[in-house]
Image (cartoon, grey):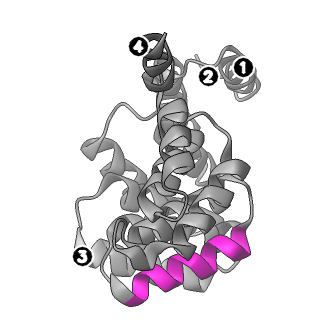
Amino acid sequence: LMLHNRAEIWKDKLSLWSDVIKKSPYKARPHMNLAHALDLEGRHEEAARGYTIALKFSRDGSASAIEILRNLGVARFRLGQLPEAIGIFRRVLIFEPDNVDILNNLSICLLETGRHDEALSTALHAEGVIPNHGEINSTLGEIYLAIKEYPKALGYFRKALKLNPDVPVRYFNAALALEKMGRLSEACLYWEQYLDLEKSVEESRLVDEHMTEIACP
């Protein structure tokens, strides 16, 4: 019976870390690990609560407060709590000013809240740290697309695709930039490449309809 119970506890990470928390409720690491497991399950609200608890206990040294904050910021972002996410990412950058992933996350949050100038300066900082970073180049493309600097947007989308050619949304965005510049035949080529990679039936259907509307061959 005891062996059976132990197997049940270890059968998945949620059970494992819940069990550890029962035994060590005031340690940061178990709370952080449970929150991470919840995040992977798509339970972002519960994950955010878990990371907040972990942060409260982070002085025990079992988990880094910065690591917890990184994860909490992402959870807030996934929940659409962008002002909170922005504040958290800025806290992380005090200690890790050249953390490209956090800079990229912050840029996206700023872009989605309409703070284009701040988004651009943050993303350019990240590009200066790692110029050949696919996500940063893609984010810069999205920022330039938002501020209607379409040639610059296209350049960044193309660079992002050169670095990581298997990301459908980058073909989508490159096609949009080309359309904005009136280069429809080139846009159609990118739409076709998008359809080759996109797994969502609904998204593919909408793009296929759009290609018909703009008379793609």
Q: Is residue 62 magenta?
A: no
Q: Between residues 148 and 61, which one lies in front from this camera angle?
A: 61
Disc with the residue nearer the chain's start (4 vs 1): 4
Task: Name the chief secondary structure element in magenta.
Answer: helix
Residue 3: which disc?
4
Element type at mark 4: helix
Q: Which residues are magenta?
A: 82-94
> Whole-Å distance between the Cαs marked 4 and 1?
62 Å
Q: Which residue was labeled with disc 1?
A: 212
Residue at image location 61% in from the left, 76% down from the top: 86
Q: Check disc 3: other Cα within 10 Å, few if <14, some if 14-19, many if 20+.
A: few
What distance separates the C-alpha of mark 1 from that of mark 3? 42 Å
> Rounded to the nearest whole Å, what is the CA distance between mark 4 and mark 2?
63 Å
Quick one: 112 or 27, which is closer to the camera? 27
Q: Could you tell me the amino acid type at mark 3?
A: Val
**Local crowd size for mark 2, using a 10 Å CA cut-off: few (<14), some (14–19), many (≥20):** some
Query: Going 45% across and 16% down the picture, which residue do you hit?
Result: 2
For marks 4 and 2, give the one nearer the viewer: 4
Image quarter for residue 137? bottom left
- Find residue 112 and report its image quarter: bottom right
Q: Residue tagged by mark 3?
A: 129
Mark 1 falls on what kind of element? helix
Return the residue at label 2.
216
| CB contact under 8 Å: marks 2 and 1 | yes
Q: Earlier in the sequence, mark 1 or mark 3?
A: 3
